[in-house]
Image (cartoon, rainbow, N blue to C red):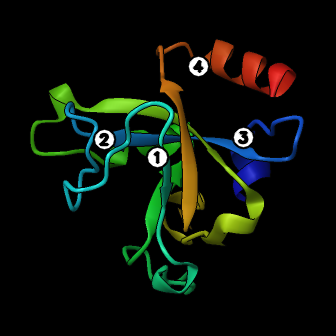
Amino acid sequence: TFLEKHKMPITSDGCIVAFKKVRGDMKDIWSRTIDNSVGNHVSVPHNSVDEDSEKTCSKGLHVCSFEYLEHYGSASSASDVILEVVVNPKDVVSIPSDYGHSKMRVCAYDVLAIWDGNLEEFYRERASNG
């Protein structure tokens, strides 16, 4: 549902390219402890991520489609940064049902780049280059 509905790019090796919003200092919005600098591999134990897709806000790392970005941010959202991340399908734990299945809870992702704001380019390049 997440991939098809939101037309998420898939890399040539089968990984999902998604978005993540973080604070201006590249730390996660909720705990302010996870470093999301470009090039970082971010992970938590698989069993620490909530598998229940009916729980809309719960434990785990979160990534999303473009459509979800407007629904999440810090108190000082003007300084928030949008990232492109890559998720191996084996690290997807659940896709909450709220917001049209537009976010995922995962146990790991790689920070690919700071998003440049060009949505057409995002889908075109990521789908063709992997």
Query: Distance between the Cα atoms at labels 3 and 4?
Result: 11 Å
* Residue of label 2: 22
Spot occupied by residue 118 in the image (x, y as percentages of width and height): 54, 13
Label 1 vs label 2: CA separation?
13 Å
| Mark closest to the chain's N terminus, 1 or 2 | 2
Q: Amino acid at mark 3?
A: Met
- Mark 1 = which residue? 68
| In this view, 109 is above or below 18 | below
> Which residue is label 4 attached to?
119
Q: Are marks 4 and 1 in contact (CB under 8 Å)?
A: no
The numbered disc on residue 8 is 3
Whether residues under marks 3 and 4 lie with C-beta atoms below 8 angstroms apart, the answer is no
User: Is disc 2 placed on a helix, strand or loop?
Assistant: strand
Question: What quarter of the picture does the C terminus occupy?
Answer: top right
- Does residue 104 appear anywhere in the picture? no
Inter-mark Cα distance, 4 to 1: 14 Å
Identity, as a three-letter code, of the amino acid under mark 1: Tyr
In primary-sequence order, the first of circles 3 and 1 is: 3
Is there a contact, CB below 8 Å, between mark 1 and mark 2? Answer: no
Q: Nearer the viewer, mark 3 or mark 1?
A: 3
Name the front one of labels 1 and 2.
2
In the rendered image, residue 69, in percent from the top left (x then y), is placed at 41, 41
- Give the mark nearer the N terminus: 3 vs 4: 3
Between discs 4 and 1, the one toward the N terminus: 1
Could you tell me residue 103's position as x and y percent?
A: 53, 57
